[in-house]
Image (tube, helix red, strand yellow):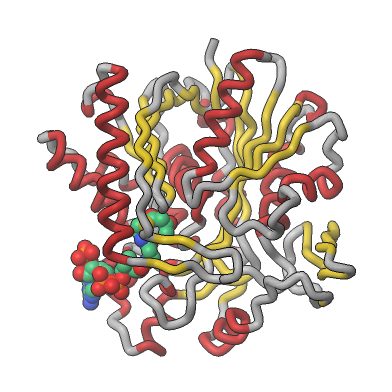
Amino acid sequence: MKIGIHDLEVATTHYVLDLDTLAERHGIDPKKFSIGLGQDAFSMPAPDEDIVTMAAEAADTLLARHDVSKIRQVLFATESSVDQSKAAGVYLHELLGLPANVRSVELKQACYSGTAALQMAVNAIARTPEEQILVITSDVARYALETGGEPTQGAGAVAMLITANPNLVEIEPGSGFHTSDVNDFWRPNDSTTPYVDGQLSLDAYLTATTAAWDDLAARRDLSIDDVDKFLHHQPFTKMARKQLAALAEHTGHELSDELIEESMSYNRALGNTYTASLYFALTAQLHNNENLAGKRLGFFSYGSGAVAEFFTGMVQENYRDHIYPEHVAKQLGNRVELTYDEYRTLHSDFAATSETYTTQPTTHAPFRLSGVTEFQRRYEAQ
Ligand code: CAA
């Protein structure tokens, strides 16, 4: 029985900052961002947006095409959680009208946990193939101002429906894993921005993903030539090129950038979306390539700290009949461009507290955070 990604949808934020604007005000050559990091812009949430509003928008569009009564679980992966106890997915039940007999849980391991959620869903459906699972990856990447990470901020969500006999990608059994305790990137409970050791994070990413490849190759007798396209977690798109080059050197195979080129278009414009980044890479590859039917995709998932997984998926025959590139174009095109001063104000005014506050309606998205009252987050459809 085939199990995998049956359908997916994405969402991002109300605002966008063009990296040329940041470069100009910081006196940096814009090519450092566009070529050096491979990034053009990043999404930024309005005060009434967060991981829940983006997830609700992506899931709402997705579920409009499906029978909600078949869904048995919501697995919400994020590293920009809005509560230390309550799972973000629980808010979706009310907003999306999900049945009460659906289980909801939140997963965390930096940018990796979306892959854990996907694999948990696949395994659960192997036992009960008639059921369907909603996997959400949703994150807001906020770095401190005037740090190396600042141009790699971003925000976005990908909602995926995991089923038997999927329309898009069958997830193949057998993954390669790598876990090592590294302090490359972490965010303590009392900090709204992460601590980052930039160079260590690059090294940790390359070491962990290469080790995950080795683990899979040993277990599945898979050669690098058996993979038709590679997809990466893309904290910035240049990272995918760095990983491919490191993999080529490690395996002694020539690996051309054509293996990844089509996977980068959305992440260039969104910035880092943490858990969602790998799945935006998948979305871009499916949208930009008409000849993927029957082809094998190799997924490099990485979460700082650090956990990596390499796994593969087979693109299904009629996948082109089940993709919606116009929805992504609308998400990207509808964003309102920020001036540098507006961006600074928005960044400084970020409210991560549980104190009471209300937000003015800003976002044009279908769901918004109306504020916090009595320490409770309030969301509404609009
Ligand atoms: N024209 C073209 N290229 C230029 C240039 C110019 N004028 N000026 C600089 N560059 C190039 C540099 O040569 C460099 O390229 P290479 O790495 O290929 O040599 C690139 O631009 C970046 O320049 P620097 O290394 O000088 O950049 P930096 O020191 O300011 O920071 C960074 C880079 C460490 C990645 C920083 O952005 C950062 O800390 N980001 C956050 C952490 C991160 O994303 N780590 C990635 C791995 S961890 C992970 O994946 C998990 C996660 O999501 C966070």
The residue under the point 61% across, 37% down is 160
Residue, far left: 252
Image spot of residue 109 (x, y percent): 51, 47
> Looking at the image, is 247 positioned above or below residue 165?
below
The x and y percentages for residue 6 are 60, 28
- Compared to residue 60, the image places residue 341 above or below, namely below
- The residue positioned 57% from the left and 51% from the top of the image is 328
Q: Is residue 25 above or below residue 357?
A: below
Q: Quadrant of the C terminus?
A: bottom right
Seen from this angle, which residue lies furthest front? 181
Q: Residue at x 66, y 44 (%)?
A: 106
Q: Is residue 34 visible?
A: no
Residue depicted at 54% across the width and 64% down the height: 188
Where in the figure is residue 196, as x and y percent of width and height? 39, 67
Residue 163, quarter of picture: top right
Question: Which of the 4 image quarters holds residue 24?
Answer: bottom left
